[in-house]
Amino acid sequence: MMEDNKKLIEIKDLKVSFFTPAGEVKAVDGISYELGYNEVMGVVGESGSGKSVEAYSIIGLLQNPGKVIGGSITFEGEDLLAYTPEQMRQFRGNKVSMIFQNPMTCLNPVYTIGNQLMEALTVHDSKITKEEARARAIEMLEKVGINNAEKRINQYPHEFSGGMRQRAMIAMALICKPKLLIADEPTTALDVTIQAQILELMKELQKKENTSIIFITHNLGVVAEICDKVSVMYAGRIVEQAKVEDLFYNPQHPYTKGLLASQPRIDEEEPERLIPIEGTPIDLLNPPSGCNFGPRCKDCMKICLTKKPPFADLGDGHISACWLHFKDLKGKKEE
Amino acid sequence: MTEERKVLLEVENLKKYFAVKTGGFKKNYVQAVESANFKIYKGETLGLVGESGCGKTTLGRTVIRLHEPTSGKIIYDGKPIYDSEKHIAENMLPYRRKMQIIFQDPSASLDPRMTVGEIIGEAIDIHKLCPNKKDRTDRIRELLSEVGLNTEHANRFPHEFSGGQQQRVGIARALAVNPEFIVCDEPISALDVSIQSQVVNMLEDLQTEKGLTYLFIAHDISVVRHISDRIGVMYLGCMVELADSYELCSNPIHPYTKTLLSAVPLPDPVKSRARDRIILEGDIPSPINPPSGCRFHTRCPYATERCKQEMPVLKEYAPKHFAACHLLEQ
């Protein structure tokens, strides 16, 4: 990222915990990143890595018993965590909006698509007339590639197919021209040919509307397709962050390397045996005192099991939290 | 295919319709599998890919007669187990020892009130494989260690396991009767990415060790290509292309296979942004009221008048490379 590029959102040392009867679950354990205008960042991780929780805390949708217990979220210079619920309500949908994984559960089945689209407009702008709102809603539906929008606007969600519903969700999210769009696994529930359609649409709209996107997914292929930079999360922490090319062609953290090596690729010459990451993800109720990935890491050292690794700056915005980088540095110094 | 390879399972014109209720007296059918024709050779893995609703799971289940076929013929190891013309419908119990299935959702397919030992033991009891109790316990332990679980796990309940471990239990249950043929119905799609490769490797190892034959069903074509010798591509109940997996992925001839391959996201930023994608218009039509003629014609960029009227049949266009498309005949 360029130095003079203004930051849209900055997250510093964010910590989110869930206070469950069984104990505290540190779902997000100190993550930091920043996102500039017109940038697309991918957040990759397995289920339970905290990637959705982090996004929910930006938009203020964290549910009990989840609580932000530390850190800060700054959006265009304003502290989001200090917002009152009313301020948050104005902010949500207007400046930041979100699309979710399953479009069926996010659309209200008893209202028409048009009704739900127009609601987003009237909530944030009390002066807008019904006719204007309707015209805007139709225009937006056309933008997301829904044919026959005049007629479609009076239909109910069940009359839309899965791909169409996700298009309607995107229309609803973008109708107030937000500066940041959070997309939480928007294509996971869709078939590959529909996924390709939606990705193509999101790329096109991102260019047209200059929206920044935080794209949450577990699919590395989707990240390669759409993102400018990527954060890889494991058990509530960011383990590696880099520009998309650096991450795929020069991965540094053992977890990122493992993920890339463990997946079969359609473009490989002869199928080779997959190299899996052994073991299972850690229990967040009893996290290890050392590196969270330590117990599954092939190159685990003594220090990895006792102390959490700091980030090593590898230049050009590429950071990776692993003791191995420091081992190399130490080796070089001794030489 | 070389002549000396033995055909283990052969399916001819297999059809499966499900009746759906509509208002009035009219009965409608979901035409889940329209006409399936294929052979599976002993020791190979045949992959089935397609989008949701294309009938791949129904086909997998119909082949082992968990669904009763509407019509057609299934021949297992030279003997017909189902033939609608000759009215043959064999008792499946002896065949269940040879044909097994691994289900997609491991938490839904394991009985939550039974321990893992009971789940695996049930299959052994039904087929009376271990008359004495000690043999039975030993066999359960052996199976658990074969799938990478600890022997003391036999006394635990399914909810105590992670998704990946539950799927291992599902695999152990399928292996309990020493089958020859296993239908793997999306065995890894419910698992986390880092766990998927563990299970894929295990399935490959078991195949080499025991000489198993797989029908591997999945929607992720990269995984199917990795594990299969041959791949069949399905669209709306019809098989549109069938070929060796490398051949199919590097040289697809059916327009649907081409679009499917170009839609797969590549974990490579430069390559994936540089390639030309074929983006299909619209969605899959409903299988209750499928399009006439070639079922792909509503979305196919090259469709002609003939495609709208006549359904193409699967023909061999290159050695061992089958496809169903009118355009290829010209």
Image (cartoon, rainbow, N blue to C red):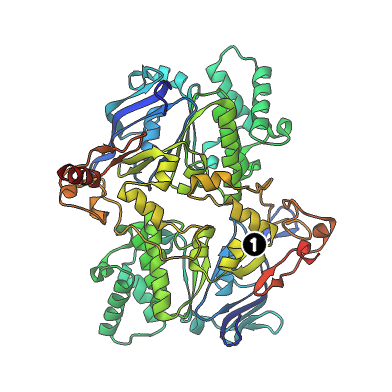
- List the residue tagged with mark 1: B252
Relative to A88, A148 lies left or right: right
Q: Is residue B166 above or below residue A166?
A: below
The quadrant the N terminus of chain A occupies is: top left
Q: Residue furthest top?
A: A127
Q: Residue B168 at what x, y percent from top left? A: 36, 66
Is residue B110 among the parts visible in the rendering? no
Name the kind of residue labelled 1 in the image: Pro
Is residue B129 shown to the viewer in this render?
yes
**Secondary structure state at the residue bearing disc 1:** loop
The chain under label 1 reads: B
Location of residue B71 (image quadrant): bottom right
Residue B312 higher or lower than A167, as above or below:
below
Relative horizontal placement of residue A54, taking residue B295 as reference (left or right): left
Kindly identify the residue that appears in the image at 17 percent across and 45 percent down: A335
Image spot of residue A200 (x, y percent): 59, 40
At x 29%, y 77%, the residue is B142
